[in-house]
Image (cartoon, rainbow, N blue to C red):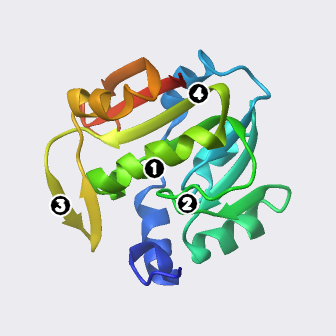
Amino acid sequence: MEDKGYYYTKESVDEYIQMAKDVNSLQLIEKLRKHLPARSLMLEVGSGPGTDWQILSKDYQVVGSDNSNEFLHRLKAKYPQGEFLQLDACTMDVNRTFDGIYSNKVLHHLSDKELQSSIQAQLPVLNKGGVICHSFWLGEGTEEFKGMFVNYHSKDELSTLFADAFEILVLEPYREFEENDSIVLIGRKK
């Protein structure tokens, strides 16, 4: 499925890379390190320009993924030693299992119904006791940003969505650009 939305053209990917160049995800990854042992096999959903993939690869065996062929082409060129898959976050159609699944501001592009599908699709992809780490924009409602759907989430909403399938280990706001503009959820498969 090749969508022609924002993340699928050379120009928009160039724009996104420029826009996200100062984002530092180390604080998220440090929280994850407390719950997922080093050298664990991890799937990153939505690797984009590869910034988080590169940080995660220092501690984990990371398989990157994206649904955008433009990002995948660039990832494979920039990190030829890496493994990158085309992957839809809703279906998680991959033929192996992982100790962890990580996404940074990816699942907020899903509607509530699509997010529920993604949560259910993550379960068979995770090994027993597997850990997820997902970040979202904190807030309420939805909006279009540069033609992209953005679904904001609250702490209570995320707890409700994930609690049946995952033991919630961390669910807290953090600062990406402004105080408490983001929220991270870390959970262990029940």
Of 8 and 122, the residue lying toward us: 122
Q: Residue at x 49, y 73 (%)?
A: 13
Q: Earlier in the sequence, mark 1 or mark 4?
A: 1
Spatial separation of the CA atoms under disc 2 and disc 3: 21 Å
Q: Is residue 55 left or right of residue 137?
A: right
Q: Decide if residue 23 is in sight here.
A: no
| Residue type at the position of mark 1 | Ser
User: Against 62, is 113 above or below?
Assistant: below
Q: Earlier in the sequence, mark 2 or mark 3?
A: 2
User: Element under label 2?
Assistant: loop
| Residue type at the position of mark 2 | Gly
Q: Residue at x 72, y 42 (%)?
A: 97
Residue 143: give its label. Answer: 3
Give the foreground label among 3 and 4: 4
Q: Residue furthest left?
A: 141
User: Element under label 1?
Assistant: helix
The residue wearing badge 2 is: 48
The residue wearing badge 4 is: 131
| Residue type at the position of mark 3 | Glu
Q: Residues within 10 Å of mark 1 (few under 14, many from 20)?
A: some
Residue 44 at what x, y percent from top left?
A: 61, 47
Spatial separation of the CA atoms under disc 2 and disc 4: 21 Å
Give the foreground label among 2 and 3: 3
The residue wearing badge 1 is: 118
